[in-house]
Structures are given as structure tokens and as C-alpha cells.
Image: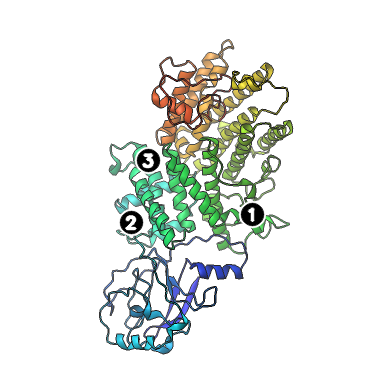
Amino acid sequence: MPVDTGLRVNGPSVAYFAEGLSNTTQANSDTAESPRRVARNEEDTTNVAHTGESSFRDLTLEESSGDAFVSSPQNNHGESMCFSFAEEPSFNIQVGDQYNLQASFSPSLSNILLEDGFQSAHFSDAYPCLEKQANPLNLPDVNATSAITQSATEIDIATTELPQTQKPKSKLYNLTVADDLVRQLVDLFFTRVSGFVPILHRPQFYARYLQKRREDAIGQNLSLEVGLMLNSMMALSARFSNAAHFANVAPTCRGESFAKEAQSIYADGTRLQGDGFVPSLQYLQGCILLSFYHNTNSSNSFGWTLTGVCARLAYDLEIDIVDEDICQQPNLFSNQWSSTEEWVLREENRRAWWSVWELDTFASTVVRRPFTIDRNKMQVLLPCSDERWFEEQPIASAPMGLTPATAWRSLQGSPNQDERAWFLVANFLMALAYDLKVQTGVSPQARAEMESALTCFSLNLPNHFRLNSSMFVFNDSTFARSNWIITTNIIMQSARTYEALIVCSSEDVSRSPSASPTNMLFNPDEQRAVAQKCVQHAHEVVRAIKAWSADYIAYSSPFIVCSLVGPAAMHILQTSSEGSSALSSLNRDVVCLGIAQYARHWGLGSIMLDLTRALNKLIGVDPTALTAREQELAIRYAQIAPSIRGKPRSTSLPLSSTPEVDPLVFGMAV
């Protein structure tokens, strides 16, 4: 918020604006306001600077991506405090014959503001030690400097303890590609990538970071947050570019250089947190995009590590309770916003939260990692459509129900009926079903509740979610909504498959160590019933792919490709039926070609395609031997084919070793 220091330089008053408050100031304000705070997006305030002669030095002025500085008159102990600079102050100061000062300063104010004509009477008693702060700027001599210094030192400095250290100068970043390519990649991000990771407000983004910058300075002098965000955006969108810059570079590799730059900036941010750098929503957004890149590009552990960082940043920013006040209202859908601006900011926080939740759910259900987010304590409304958010048209929404019985009805009666909100509910139900599947001793009541909840959700879906290909229209303006509909249907089949594989507790079940996983837990009749359910769910996945436009598959969430691996092998369950082998093989080809569409642009798609080939070898469709990589994938992604038995989380498998396959549930879990 604006903070007027009351200081005057050659007459005109100077107001200093700060987006990021010091810890002391923030702590004081938090106690005076509601205990719940909405995480603020610390965006940059940009002003086009005047040019002219400065008595200090000539400056080439461009928009600043930094923050201003703030005053903190008293700390928590009532002691007087000095001015505190944010890392990248941005000033527009009008003095005398009009000039502007915009640069990154050290905390010293004596030689910056105390020019000739400045009277000691302008000093506030709360700031007696300005001239004593360390490391003044190296500025030209000014006639009145000595007199001003004398005036300042006459103030009793015993009342305030001088800081022993100061925050380091903020580092600015430059992009490594031409500005026209930056614009193209930003455009591609919003037209091709933002559909499945919709965390940035497109009109505001263009206004803040592109339209107010000179055409030849888009990628220059960027703050840490903006540098991280832009590089992460381009890492995701470069795969869809046909620019000459990427000639002879495979689509899946075009974002590597941007990802490395983003990762380097992220490392700077991590180091600076020990020096007072406070992560903002903008920083979290950059981390989310970088985490999406790594999780969809390869199977390295950094993506999972960064997902955990995103979750902890989200908790630190308190966006897990961004709608705590709304969730506690007697009438949920009334009074959800006091102003359009508040609603737009809340929606931005909601979208960041749900994207972090999607990352965490993917890592947990596919790569068998522990959940980081406690989904039993989320107080965040489901997101609305991009159109409403971009046009700033508020609409009431609903939170996610936290149990199977309440989750399926989350959007029942809600004014918000956005397709992505329905997908998130389906994904949440899938995560609940997965939790039950991996548990031991599940009660029959819990399994029955899960089955009923999935049925209720399917029956409660809006009519346009039905898999009727004639109802789907795919073009550049509608594909995002249609993709959410298709992927909702696919993720529901994953949830139903998990539910079919839930084993209820039974005291009389024999658990022979030598028995196969399925035979150990199901009797023959149950095995046949489970197999039939899995086949039916796989057929529904095939129906969804048939309703999909091949041109737009790669623009949906790449995580969905993991849900296609199991159905790609479904034909093994039908070979005993006369005349079914040919149809089963064709259906398998349909799913494999769907996976191949992802593999053209996403590293995760290539991994799943290789895994599918490995599974075909394991079941005898392909008689050739497994390669070392295929054996490794079969173990690493054993959750996708849960009855492939091997060491969990093993990163290697001896070439002489062959994973054991249970044909009942092979490839049917996701």
C-alpha cells in the first residue's frame, strides 16, 4: 500500500510505494486486521519515466520490475526504526526542473535525498539515523552535503540502534532470446499451455509485462519473480513454436534452455530467502510453471521436489484458506466478494492452489509419492471460467467436498459450472479411490460409499459432458473446454478402476506369500467380476479418445497420458472370447496412438509410450526382450500396472530379471 514518508525534496512531497512489506510492518498489520489474510500478488507498479538532467547522474529510465521502499516507524518493541529498502526500489521523483530517479539503491538515504535546500526540520523524530547507514552511493559532490550531514548528526542517535547488516542489492535478469521471440512464446503460452495450467490473468499479464515496456526491452532488467515466470512460461510453450530459432530441435527439447535459466533463478531465490527475500504469489506462479515443466518433461526427482516446494509456498502464503471466511458463511453463495478487484485476486489465488494440488496428486497417484497437501483442510473455492476471470465478471463458486459423499455434489447448485471445476472434482474422487486402493483392511462400507459416490458424480455431470462426438466442437476458442470434458471422462475411468481394485478386509481370506496379488485377495468369481469392470472402464477410455480431436490432444494436461497406459493393454483380457481379438487389438491401437499424440510434444508422453511397449513385451504381444530402459520404466511406474511386482521406487533392474505380471489387473489401475 502507499506509504507517504512526509519527506520533501526541494519542495514537492515524495510518496514511496511498497508492494512487499517488511516482516515487522506485516506483523503489526496482521494483528490489526483479520487473522486470515489473502495472499497478495506482489506485482510491479510500472510508470513511464520522464527524462532530463539529474544533479546526481544521467539515468536511462525504463519501467522497473522492482518494489519501492517502506517506512517502519516502530518495531514490535516500540523502538524507532529506519527506512527499509525493498530489493528493487522504483522511484519517480519530481524535483526542481523535473527529473526522475529510478535505480537499485543501497539502504543509505543521506546522500540520496538530503540535497541542498533540504531542511533538518523535515526529519521525523522516528528516523534519526538516516545518515549513519552504511555504504552510501558513490554520487557527485554536492555543495550542501556537509551542512546536511551536520544537521542530521545533531539528532540524538542513541534512541535507535543501527542495523549491523543490510540487504544485498537485488539482481536483475535478462532473457537470452530476442524480444520478438519472447512475444511469440508468451502468445503460445496463453493459446496452447494456459488451457491446462490457467494460473495467469492474461489481460493483466500483457498490460504489466509487455504493453508498458519498450519493444526492444521486453526481456531486459527483470526482477527475480518476473525472470522466473517468463523463463518457465517459455520452457512450456517453446515446444509448440515453429520459429527458426528452434530449427532442427525436437519439440520436447526446445524448452530446455529456458528451463535451465528458470532453475538458476529459482536457486537464486532460494539463497536470497536467507537474506530477507520473501516469496510472493508471483514467485509461486513461476515455481508452479517450472514444476509443470519438469513433471511433464522427464522422470527426474527435481519435479517432485519442486512440487513440494510449491505446496509449502502455498501454505506459507495461506492460499489454502483464501476462502475461509466464505466457507464459514451460512449462505455459501451470497456475499462472496466486496469488490471486483477482490474477486479477481481471490480467483488468482484459487487457481494457484488448485494447480499445486494437481501437481501433488499426480506425483502421489502415478509415481507413488506421499501426498504433501492435507486435502482435509482446504478452504478454497473451485475456479471459474477463463472468460469470466479475464473479463472480471464475478460469479459465486463452491468449495470441494472432502469426503466421497460430499465431493461428488461439490458443484450441485453452484452458479459456477466451469468444465475445469468438474474435472477437479473428478480428479479429487480419483485420489480418494486411490487412497482406498492402497490401504489394507478397507471396510465394505467404505468401498460401497466410494462406488456410490462415483456413480452419483457420473449421473450428476452436465449433459454436455456425455461422450457423444457430435456434441464436441474443437477449434482454437473452444478446445480448452472440450479437453476438460474429455479428460474428466478419462479420469473418471481411472477412479472407477481404482475402486474396482479395492480389497475389503476379511478375516477368512488366505494370504499365501506365493500367491499372485490378485489370487491372494479375490476368489475366482471376484476375479472375473473385477476383470469385466476393468474392461468396461477401458472401453470408456477408448470412447473418449474417439470423441477427441487429434489436433488438440497435446494441448490438454499431459498428466492424462498416464491414464491411457492401462487401457492400451486391455486386449489381453478379451483374447479368450471368440472374435474379440481383432477388435481388442484395434482398440489398443486407438489408445496407443492417443499416447503418441502426447509423445510428439511432451517428454512424459514419450516415457508412457516406451512403457506401453514394455508392457506389450511383458504380456507376450511383442516377443522381443525388454531393454534396460523398459525394465526400469516397468518398475518405476509400477503403480500404472500395479500387479507388476518389483522393488518399489527402484531406479534400475538387472537385465536378467523380469517383472512378474498378474494378467487380471495388468495395466488397469490408471
Return the residue nearer the eye: 315 or 510: 510
Q: Position of residue 388 (x, y in %)?
A: 56, 53
The disc labelled 3 sits on which kind of residue? Arg
Tell me the crowding category of disc 2: few under 14, some 14 to 19, or many 20 or more residues within 10 angstroms, Cα based.
many
* Label 1 sits on residue: 396
Return the residue nearer the eye: 61 or 307: 307
Which quadrant is home to the C terminus? top right
Query: Residue 345, located in which quarter of the rendered image?
Result: bottom right
Q: CA distance from mark 1 to mark 2?
A: 38 Å
Please name the residue shown 51% across and 20% down the image. 660
Checking the image for residue 618, the label placed there is: none
Element at label 1: loop
Q: Which comes sooner in the sequence, label 3 or label 2?
A: 2
Q: CA distance from mark 1 to mark 3?
A: 36 Å
Query: Residue 236, located in which quarter of the rendered image?
Result: top left
The disc labelled 1 sits on which kind of residue? Ala
Give left or right: position of 231 versus 501.
Answer: left
Please name the residue shown 33% across and 66% down the image. 62
The disc labelled 2 sits on which kind of residue? Gly
* Label 3 sits on residue: 239
Q: Nearer the viewer, mark 1 or mark 3?
A: 3
Element at label 3: helix
Q: Position of residue 285 (x, y in %)?
A: 47, 52
Report the coloring of the rendering: rainbow
Q: Which comes sooner in the sequence, label 1 or label 2?
A: 2
Element at label 2: loop
Query: Residue 39, located in which quarter of the rendered image?
Result: bottom right
Checking the image for residue 219, the label placed there is: 2
User: Where 361 falls versus 214 (above or below)?
Assistant: above
Q: Are marks 1 and 2 in contact (CB under 8 Å)?
A: no
Is residue 94 something one can see in this rendering?
Answer: no
Q: CA distance from mark 3 to mark 2?
A: 20 Å
